[in-house]
Image (cartoon, rainbow, N blue to C red):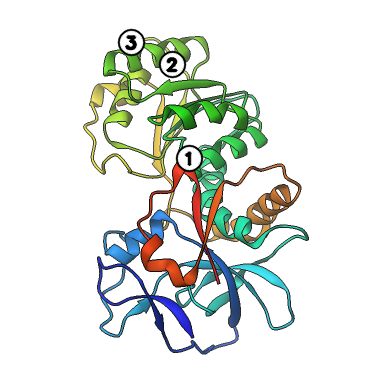
Amino acid sequence: MKAAVVYKMGELPKYAEFQEPVAANENEVLISVKAVAITNLDKGIASGEHYSSENENQNGFIIGSDAIGLLENGTTVYARGISGTIAEKALVEKNRMVALPYGIDVATAAAMPNAVAGSAMALRFRAGIKPGETVLINGATGFTGQMAIQIAKYYGAKKIIVTGRNEKTLQSLLELGADEIVSLKQNDESFISQLKEIHQNTPIDIVLDYLWGHSAELILSVLKGNGNFTPKTRYVSVGSMSGDVIQLSSQILRSVDLQLSGSGLGSWTKDEVKLLFSEILPEMFLLASQNKLKVNIEKVNLVDIEKMWNAEVSDGKRLVILI
């Protein structure tokens, strides 16, 4: 079968022939793959930089961690891969599989799960979002950030504040449900001043942070209290696009009612992952099929995997490989 194969960590995936996988037990099933999204997780695994990356395989390995595909009976499903998924065939887990609703495009469905997990899981299980709360999304111009805006609104957020560097994309976030824009291109003093004013008028209940790094330090400094009682803020780190390490003053932790946590692979419980597949993903796929979620994608063919792997995708789109 044809597949996207990585022969050496850090090199681009190749369009190559690879042995078709075979199911080893009753929880494994082979699907005919139709669409797979390229995510930052997949790129991190391919480069060896992600904490879930495995040791290098001298025979190569197929990249891709999930897929949209067809079962033998013709049912279209989303599933997590056991084998790599950017291939004509993939092994998937029966208990991590979701049948797709009628009318949803396979490329749209392929683009959603990583972003849904990176936003809905954080909002529901780490932040415990309640209707009427104010949410700040740091780094909202990317694909997952755009999904997070819509999902936070769906979960009842009263006000959504977004940050980002791309001015054109930032403005477009207002159409997705954002209420206030804070540009990361302004100097630190202006950024802090603008965010402090917002926080004083409508205290920030939840921060979803896809950037970390310096912008996280600025946001945490805004949350710092002055000795009076403070509202509780749940700060959830989901990504680290701007750097993996920050300096955090202990005064911030002592001066504000702050819950600091992370949301990602390894941090979720088994019960939370079960809910992702039994409840959250089916609900979000249904919303997309009803055109109640905007999913911004760019489609390419498997044969072009090497050329498109590191391509710049504009306006926070997600690149989807069609097979």
Which class describes the residues within 10 Å of circle 3: few (<14), some (14-19), or many (20+)? few
Q: Residue type at mark 2? A: Thr
Front tag of 2 and 1: 1
Measure the alpha-carbon separation of dots 2 and 3: 9 Å
- Marks 2 and 1 close (CB-CB < 8 Å): no
- Where residue 248 sits, quadrant-wise, is top left
Residue 156 in percent (x, y) is at 66, 31
Residue 215 in percent (x, y) is at 31, 29
Question: Helix, strand, or loop for circle 1?
Answer: helix
- Where residue 271 sits, quadrant-wise, is bottom right
Considering depth in this image, is 186 or 79 the residue closer to the camera? Answer: 186
- Marks 2 and 3 close (CB-CB < 8 Å): no
Residue displayed at 60% across by 79% down: 31
Considering depth in this image, is 46 or 221 the residue closer to the camera? Answer: 46
Res 137 visible: yes
Question: Helix, strand, or loop for circle 2?
Answer: loop
Measure the alpha-carbon separation of dots 3 and 1: 39 Å
Of label 3 and label 1, which has the lower sequence position?
A: 3
Which class describes the residues within 10 Å of circle 1: few (<14), some (14-19), or many (20+)? some
Q: Which circle marks residue 226 in the picture?
A: 3
Q: Which circle marks residue 178 in the picture?
A: none
Q: Which circle marks residue 315 in the picture?
A: 1
Q: Which residue is identified by label 2?
A: 230
